[in-house]
Image: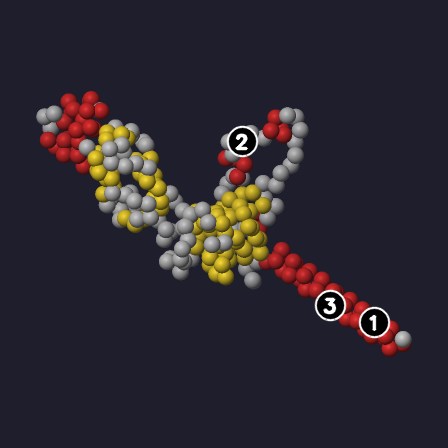
Amino acid sequence: MAANSLVRVIIINIVVIIVVVALLFGGYIYYNNSVNYVSSQDAQVTGTVVPITVQFSGKISNWYASVNSTVNQGEALGAESNSSVLAMNSGLSQAVAHNSQLLNKLKSREQVTAPITGTIIQSNVSAGQIVQPGQVVAQMVNLNSLYVTANIPETKINQVNVGQKVDVTIDGIPNTTFNGTVMKIENATQSAFSEVPNLTSMSGSYTKVMQRIPVLVSLDQGYSGKPIVPGMNAEVRIHVNSNN
């Protein structure tokens, strides 16, 4: 009996020691992360999406742009038919009737060309479709110049500065950490751009909600060729202590 009691005491002491060590280690990890890093799981891969529009009303006579295709700046994506542009823009017919130079200039503007070198991520028209000025016929982005938008709690934003190092992980590419740098801190919270009104304040009551401020993180060279696309979920860990 005495031996069993001794074994029981030893086991209990070992368990207590393990628990204490685990708590101390967990406390150290929490303290280290809170002092040296600001983290956010509310982040997404983004890029500068460039809309492609037409200058005149007309009918698309040719359309070559296809989603996921990579094109160079100035490359033809399609064209409007000259006859449809003249027919649908009455003032142009008189302007170019006796001026070959203006007519040639008009024909060049009927070409729909790529404004940047990048990848087509959306195509909204096809041959034979009527289009209007300002209508977005396609959208493209440079996949070699992506960045991450991370939403940082307002209580932590004072620790974040431009130029700080960032560890970036992307949900779609597990077991890989990308190096990044804080390149911009927005001057307004997410809610400042929301189109949904604050219903609690309108009803006379108010519930304080933690606000988040977008921080733009550039991805350092080396991610090119990875299957990263705009919209992918990401997590960031910003090094706010220069010694870490």
Q: Is residue 232 above or below residue 204?
A: below
Q: Earlier in the sequence, mark 2 or mark 3?
A: 3
Residue at 52 percent of width and 34 percent of height:
194
The circle drawn on residue 8 is: 1
Task: Specify whether 74 is left or right of 146.
Answer: left
Which residue ends up furthest to the bottom in the rendered image?
Answer: 3
Question: Disc 1 marks which amino acid?
Answer: Arg
Mark 3, Cα crowd under 10 Å, few <14 / some 14-19 / many 20+, is few
The circle drawn on residue 18 is: 3
Question: Disc 3 marks which amino acid?
Answer: Ile
Residue at 23 percent of width and 45 percent of height:
75
Q: Is residue 101 above or below residue 183?
A: above
Residue at 42 percent of width and 47 percent of height:
230
Look at discs 2 and 1 and give the one toward the viewer.
1
Cα–Cα gap, marks 3 and 1: 15 Å
Q: Nearer the viewer, residue 64 or 28?
A: 64
Whether tag 2 and tag 1 are in contact, CB under 8 A, the answer is no
Task: Specify whether 43 is left or right of 16.
Answer: left
Look at discs 2 and 3 and give the one toward the viewer.
3
Q: Secondary structure at mark 3?
A: helix
Which residue ends up furthest to the front in the rendered image?
Answer: 1
Residue position marked by numbered label 2 in the rendering: 196
Cα–Cα gap, marks 2 and 1: 62 Å
Q: Secondary structure at mark 1?
A: helix
Task: Specify whether 116 is left or right of 28.
Answer: left
